[in-house]
Amino acid sequence: MIYLDNAAASPIDEEVLDAMLPYLKEEYGNPSSKYYCKADNAKQAVEEARKKVASLFGASSDEIIFTAGSTESTNMIIKGVLDYSKYYCGGKDHVITSNAEHKSALNVCRYLNGEIYSNRDATMSLFFANSRVDRGFRASFIEVDKNGIVSPEKLEEAVTDRTALASFIYVNNETGSINDIAALAETAHNHNVPIHADVTQAAGKMPVNVRELGVDFLSASAHKLYGPKGVGCAYIKADKYGLPPMTALIHGGEQENGLRAGTLAVHNIVGFGKAAEIALRDMEKNRKIISELDDHLVTMLKSCGDVRIFIPNELRAKGIISILVDRTDFNNERFIKRVSDEIAVSAGSACSLGEPSHVISALGMDADVNKIIRVSLNKYTTKADIDTLVSLLKK
């Protein structure tokens, strides 16, 4: 199996697996327990991993909260900031995002906006189908341009005196489009609005420094940078008093600064820390590998006739390539199913459950939504893997 769906999940690095195994076998203590060595060892391992993750993002270790992944981090940040701002900060109840975000941000904002109650169903009652409810919050969804990018000018237009947060993806998980997070952060801060960035597809693949980007919050997952699934982090910018107050997503114990209750998954956190350490160590080497593979794919696709990449190379992150097969008889789902024994690619986000891509629709390409496949590379991909994909496309 040739694996070219790394925007969904990357393979785990052998160094990461080796680092995790002791915490599944011998060091199984609960880091929240006291006094005995297994608890202390687990706690020390968690804090060492926290330092490594913080280093990847240019943050302080006390600004990193471990979660189950980017989706949970994004939920915690958006819901936590909005709830606290509304009830403890003068009634600020407005959030701004874009119409091309990952579902973890898009559906949180739709929920706060009273449009949905679950991830599959619109808000409804026995008497009024799709009835919007008033949860006391408002969300604005900025339209992206034809390349999937949010302009600071659009953000400027959307800000009000009740805006509590702006939230944008750094590298789009379907198209690879790169938002200018630093410019968006500057615009938000000009109105005293904090900003959250989902850096899931950028982390470990390109420099992500929270100070340089100017972000107040950040979400990331380990399984997109050769770490384990089920663990991620939220970066929360501290001031001289510590972390800013926000409503907890999970109530219970006082783990993770009181913001995320529950026993920590030490083995996963250790794996995340090791993956972050490797990503920082090998970033330039891996970026060169991915860049050369990306260039090879772009070159090879030129021989495929009715196949093109619709996001300009200079506007997207290397390693995520959305390909438009401009033929009336092509259907991406049928193609993916047909080649699934040989190669793994996708029609878009793994979070969309086979639905047409809302990201492609946001780019004004509704007519082409079933003609697009996403190819995403990793450090183990070879040129021969890419040649096989191109050969299948030609057939």
Image: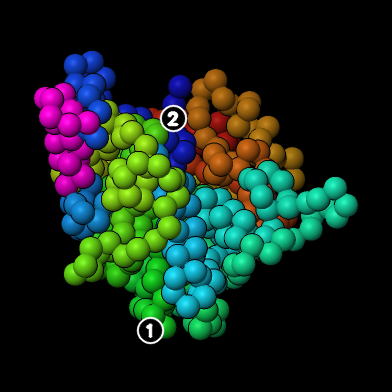
| Amino acid at circle 1 | Asn
Could one spot residue 335 in this view of the protein? yes
Specify whether residue 192 is painted magenta. Answer: no
Q: Nearer the viewer, residue 213 or 255?
A: 255
Residue occupying the far right of the picture = 127
Give the mark nearer the N terminus: 1 vs 2.
2
Image-based side of 215 in relation to 1, left or right: left
The magenta stretch is: 33-51
Q: Which mark is residue 190?
A: 1
Q: Nearer the viewer, residue 394 or 356?
A: 356
Question: Where is residue 137 drawn, in percent x and y?
Answer: 59, 67
Residue occupying image coordinates x 65% and y 38%: 354
Specify whether residue 42 is painted magenta. Answer: yes
Number of disc labels: 2
Question: Where is residue 238 drawn, in percent x and y?
Answer: 25, 64
Question: Where is residue 302 drawn, in percent x and y?
Answer: 50, 48
Q: Which mark is residue 3?
A: 2
